[in-house]
Structure formats: C-alpha cells, structure tokens
Image (cartoon, helix red, strand yellow):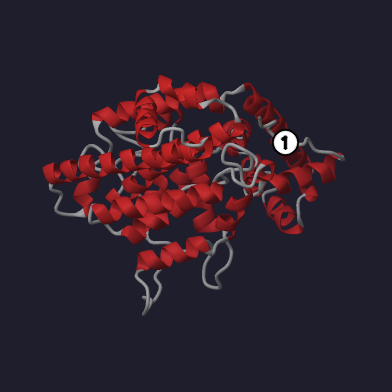
Amino acid sequence: MPEPLSPTRTEFQRDRDRIIHSTAFRRLAHKTQVFVPHEGDHYRTRLTHTIEVGQIARALARALGLDDDLAEALALAHDLGHTPFGHTGEDVLEEKMAAHGGFDHNAQALRIVTRLERRYAGHDGLNLCWETLEGLVKHNGPMTGPHALAKYRERGVPLAILEFDAQFPLELRSFASAEAQSAAIADDIAYNAHDIDDGLRAGLFELDDLRSVDLLREILGEIDRLHPGLERGRVIHEIGRRVITRFVEDAITESQRRLAEAAPPSAADVRCAGRALVSFSDAFIEADKALKGFLYPHMYRHARVMKVRGEAAAVVERLFDRFCAHPQDMPAEWTMRAAAAAGDDARRFRVVTDYIAGMTDRYALAEHRRLFGDAPRITIAFA
C-alpha cells in the first residue's frame, strides 16, 4: 500500500531496515544452518549466514553499478521463511502439506513479509516495495514459462505465491532484477565457503580430502607455497577467504561481460534478457558443481548429520500432527487463527504450518518437551 516517502532513506533502504527489525529476522539467530548452534558457538546459524550473504551481495552490486541497498535487502530477507532444523523441517512440512498447497521456504518468506509480521498500525506485513517482493520470490530464477526452474516445472508454483501473484503480479515468467541475481549468487558463494569451514572444524572431513576438488587442491597448493607449515586453523580460514575471493572476482568479471553484451537500457530489460546476467563463468559454474558434489556426501549426507536430521524430522512431524489434532495446544493467538479456519483443513493446517515454520530450533524442542514430556538432544558428536 502507498506510504509517504521517507525524508532520510530511500525506499530500498527502508525495506532493508524493516527486514532487519522484523521478528522473523531475529529468529534466524537460533535456526540451524547445517549444525545446531548450541553444539559450538563458532558454527553458522541462519543469521550469521545471512549476514555473510549480505556482505557479498553488497560487494557484487557495488562492483556492477547496481543498487546495493536493494541487493542487501534481498540478501537479508532470503532465508526468512526457513523452518527450524534447516532443510529437514522444510522437508517434513512439504510432505505434510502436499495435499494442501505444499510448503516452500521462499513462499513462506513471502507470507512473512506480506501477512505474518504484525508490527505496524496501518498494515500487516512489512509493506515492502514491488522490487523487493519480486526479488524475494524469484531470486533463483523464473517460476513459470520456458526458463522456469526445474523444481517449479516439476512441482508447480507454491500456492502462497500464486495467490499473492493473482492480486499483486510479480511477473513469474521473467528473471528477477540484477540485484536479486546478485543476492542469489552471493548465497551460493557464502554457503560453499562456510560449509567447508564448518565441516572441517566439525571433523566431518579433513584437509587432504579437499584435494579431490580441483579448485580446492589449487588453493591448498597456493597456501602451502606461500605459508609453509601454517597451523591448521589458519589454513582453514585461508581456504574460506580464498574461495570467496575467487568466486566473487569471477562473478564480477563474468557479470560485467554479460551486462555489456546485453546492454539492457532498463531493469525491465534485465528481466527479459532470457538468461541471468549476474553469473559465474562456465569454468566457475563447474567449480561450483564440484564443490557441491564434494559437500553433499561428505557433509550434508554424512552419517552423523543424517542421524541428527532423523531426530529433528521426528520433532517437527510430531508437533505438526499434535497441533492439527489439538489446535488448542498452540498459544492463544494461533488457537484463534486455527478456530477461524474451522471446517477448512487446508486453511487450518496452514495456520499450524505458519506456527511451526516460525519456531527456532530451541523453541521447537521446548514445545516438544512441553507436549510429550521429553525431547531428543539434537546434537552432532564433533570430532
């Protein structure tokens, strides 16, 4: 809805500030990235990851002559819709809601910033600009049409996005702005680098294991030549900073080339370019695939991580089933919302989903303990 312009901030700066001051943003401090934060203070949470993504997105946007406030706002908002226990919670809610519109963390982020945040006297949500909402939904690519992302071609566009788009069109067939593309690529860069760091510190794999990836073997050789005998902790940090630098510099060079080639006269032309204009080069697209190919079995599907994921999934599943059967077990505000949806399972289950998705890890465990008398101690046995 229209608002008076701020005398001291641009509209994108105001969007960024509202995101930072939202309840959903604060909750990221206690939501899992890959590891549970109480297992070690130096491992990433969704909040620390988001801050890192924001820094990289700003750097990319400034180098490319884009609006760095919009890029930062999108980076800071990109994980607002994540559930407790990382992708584990999302997987459970997607399965539970499959018959009722599904669950997608980007769609949940849209619900948060347009409906669920209730802070302002004049409107629900944060009343963000169109460009911010569009970038939040489409930062990874188009959702319909010939360039749609594979997961949306296979599963369809999440219901929450379709419903919002019907009232407030977001041009789901087109690419997002260059600023949104910068935020998306910054996300890839940040989690590649910090997942290597966290995995090494957790003992899920060793430095020599990284040599199976060409880029990491090259970086380790460089560190060995420049700093022979360097202690392990400093080597780990050097790997992370060099991974970030290489990917950022490649993204800037390739994106400058693409933008010069396309020469889009407007943001609308960026959206209709037929491909992402902020991108890695072909060589670094392959390097990114190789890094993810290493991390998937060595970290995301490591036996210790999978054990934790199983325990976390059981917590989310039991909470969902309990609140759907006994909505009065939720806090009064949420019980009232569920009561207003009585007789409509899709709406009632969506209320439960909104409640659970907003939980931090520790709150989900506390709710499980309150309702069932105990809760698993969800930790990873670090080496």
Give the answer, above or below, for where 238 lies relative to 59.
above
The x and y percentages for residue 21 are 54, 64
Q: Is residue 80 in sight in this rendering?
A: no
Q: Quadrant of residue 153?
A: top left
Q: Quadrant of the C terminus?
A: top right
Q: Quadrant of residue 277?
A: top left
Q: Residue at x 58, y 51 (%)?
A: 28
The x and y percentages for residue 361 are 68, 44
303 or 97, which lies in front? 303
The answer to whether residue 261 is left or right of residue 145 is: left
Q: Is residue 85 in sight in this rendering?
A: yes
The answer to whether residue 332 is left or right of residue 274 is: right
Badge 1 is on which residue?
378
Give the answer, above or below, for where 164 lies relative to 9.
above
Q: Residue at x 32, y 39 (%)?
A: 247
Q: Quadrant of the N terminus?
A: bottom left
342 or 253, which lies in front? 253
The x and y percentages for residue 93 are 62, 36
The x and y percentages for residue 67 are 29, 59
Q: How many marks?
A: 1
270 or 26, which lies in front? 26
